[in-house]
Amino acid sequence: MNNSGFDVMLPAAAIAGVMIAAMVVRSRAMPRPAWVNTRAGRWLAGRGPAYLSDKDSPPHFLLVTDLDCTLTMDNHTLTKHATEISSVVDAGTAEFNKRWEAMKARRDKNCVLCYSTGRSMDIFEVLVSEQRARTESVFPDGPLLLPDVLITADGTSIHWLEEDGKLAYDVEWESILKTGWNVEQVRQVFMENPEVAKYGVDLQVINRLEGFRVSAVIEGEEASRIAEESIRRAIDECKSRIDAHVFTCTHTGGGSKEKPQFWLVATSKSGGKGQALDYVRKRISADADNVLVAGDSGNDSPMFDFAARNGVRGVVVGNAKPELFNYAKQFGVHIFAEQYCAQAITYALDKLRF
């Protein structure tokens, strides 16, 4: 994916139903998603304060949520579950959407919805399209809401919704990510690493055109740990110093119970979902007591680091992977819901009385 400063056109509130304009760098037969429940934002990207409410005050509430297996599921992942799970997931998203819109109405729209996904922009659009096609006739309130902030590619790209309905790329965040980072050198480390070559099952993703993330798919939990440690050592041994954040997490859409697959990822050390959350919070002056994060797997773990995130609480969804469940449990402050996906987020909103 190209992380350069393009804008993705989104409809203003008065023209809900207009399709998202195609990015000039992409061409796809699949129609662009038509957002519902849209509204014009109050955002500025790369200059001045990011968020200004009508009363020039910080937001009443900021929700930062993962998408896959947290707010929704894609069609492929749903095929791995019992048939009735699809209805539970989609009904939960519809319930959350109504809950969110009601909270915004009570708080004079002074609530901020942020999606933080491992997907790059183009496959984020794929998820939106297929989720809408699956839900709109069965659950009219089910299609994903338009976010105020969109964090993609594991915290290495941020877009803000502007008043004219555009999602504007944050060039300030890009400049932060550039410090100590060399994507070509990290990509070369992945391509030449013997453990990645031995255990990797989808090595083509190494060459994805992403400026601040390099990744591969590894088969087997133990193999993923071996490959992660090998990549860490190789990056540390580079002649030119590279500051990287290296991690593994479950590939929820890949592998099987018998042969699980894992993402092996390296981003700029300034990247990752936790650092992106900190940046968004600072830009909109969101107090930790008025922030909730939601997630299901290992790449969400930095958002649940209670100390590093200065007291931000989170909800671990009922279908979360052990890697996140065990990590978040050590802090003793997060909510562990029994409900799946978006139903867990709604449960947390009610529990915290937002």
Image: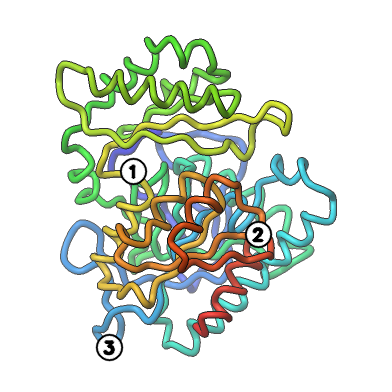
**Residue under label 1:** 156
Q: Amino acid at mark 2?
A: Gly
Disc 3 and disc 1 in contact, CB within 8 angstroms: no
Q: Name the secondary structure under disc 3.
A: loop
Q: Position of residue 18 (x, y in %)?
A: 54, 60
Q: Position of residue 46 (x, y in %)?
A: 20, 56
Residue at coordinates 66% horizontally, 68% vertically from top-left? 343
Mark on residue 301? none
Q: Name the secondary structure under disc 1.
A: loop
- Is residue 7 visible in the rendered structure shown here? yes
- Is residue 11 visible in the rendered structure shown here? no
Tell me which corner region of the image, top left, top right, bottom left or bottom right, holds residue 159.
bottom left
**Residue under label 2:** 318
Q: Is residue 8 above or below residue 294?
A: above
Q: Nearer the viewer, residue 207 or 6?
A: 207
Q: Position of residue 339 (x, y in %)?
A: 69, 65
Q: Amino acid at mark 3?
A: Lys
